Structure formats: structure tokens, C-alpha cells
């Protein structure tokens, strides 16, 4: 297991829900003790745009949210 990691966000697709936004992000994970790795994550942003990493999990309420985010990422050309 990595000692620590920094996440570099390359692009994101957004789904606004009430005062928050669910983001699907294309990332590079920069680890302190091993080689960098590309990857993806889902993460919420609050009403002012701050990340809400809630213990590393992001609830996705339904398939419509998921498919919308994936389709937006495909449309932008990164997924």
C-alpha cells in the first residue's frame, strides 16, 4: 500500500444536484513510494466548489447520474 498520494485532475465531467456537484474525474495518482498511475474517480463538490472526499467514497444515487457523467466524459473525448 502506498504511503501517500497526490491526485492530479486532468479533466472532469459534472452533474449538478441541488447545491452540490458530482464529478467524474480523469486523474493521475502521484505516489510517494511508487510509480505514478492514471485512473478515474467520482467525487462530490460542495456549493462553492470545494471537494468533499467523504472517506474515499462518493454516493451515486442512480443509473441516470452515472450514465450522464460517462456520456459527458465521452463527449469531451477522455473516456
Image (cartoon, rainbow, N blue to C red):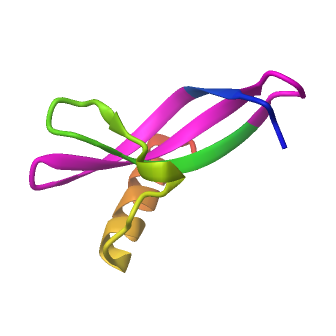
Q: Say which of 14 and 44 sits in front.
A: 44
Q: Is residue 50 above or below residue 53?
A: above
Q: Nearer the viewer, residue 21 or 12?
A: 21
Q: From the viewer's perspective, is 43 left or right of 46?
A: right
Q: As drawn, which residue projects farthest toward the right?
A: 34
> Residue 23 in magenta?
yes
Q: Answer above or below: position of 56 versus 12.
A: below
What residue is at 37 percent from the left and 78 percent from the top?
63
Residue 70 vs 47, above or below: the answer is below
Residue found 14% across the figure and 38% down from its top: 47
Residue 13 percent coordinates (x, y):
39, 45
**Left or right: 2, with 54 as reference point:** right
Left or right of 66 on screen, residue 9: right
What residue is at 48 percent from the left and 57 percent from the top?
57
> Which quadrant holds residue 52?
top left
- Give percent across and percent down for residue 70: 46, 59
Measured as percent of width and height from the top left, residue 28 is found at: 67, 31
Q: Quadrant of the N terminus?
A: top right
Magenta part of the chain: 9-37
Amino acid at each position: 500500500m502506498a504511503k501517500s498520494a497526490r491526485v492530479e485532475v486532468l479533466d472532469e465531467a459534472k452533474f449538478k444536484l441541488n447545491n452540490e456537484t458530482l464529478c467524474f474525474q480523469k486523474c493521475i495518482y502521484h505516489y510517494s513510494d511508487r510509480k505514478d498511475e492514471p485512473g478515474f474517480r467520482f467525487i462530490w463538490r460542495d456549493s462553492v466548489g470545494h471537494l468533499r472526499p467523504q472517506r474515499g467514497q462518493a454516493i451515486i444515487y442512480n443509473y441516470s447520474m452515472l450514465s450522464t457523467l460517462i456520456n459527458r466524459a465521452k463527449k469531451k473525448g477522455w473516456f
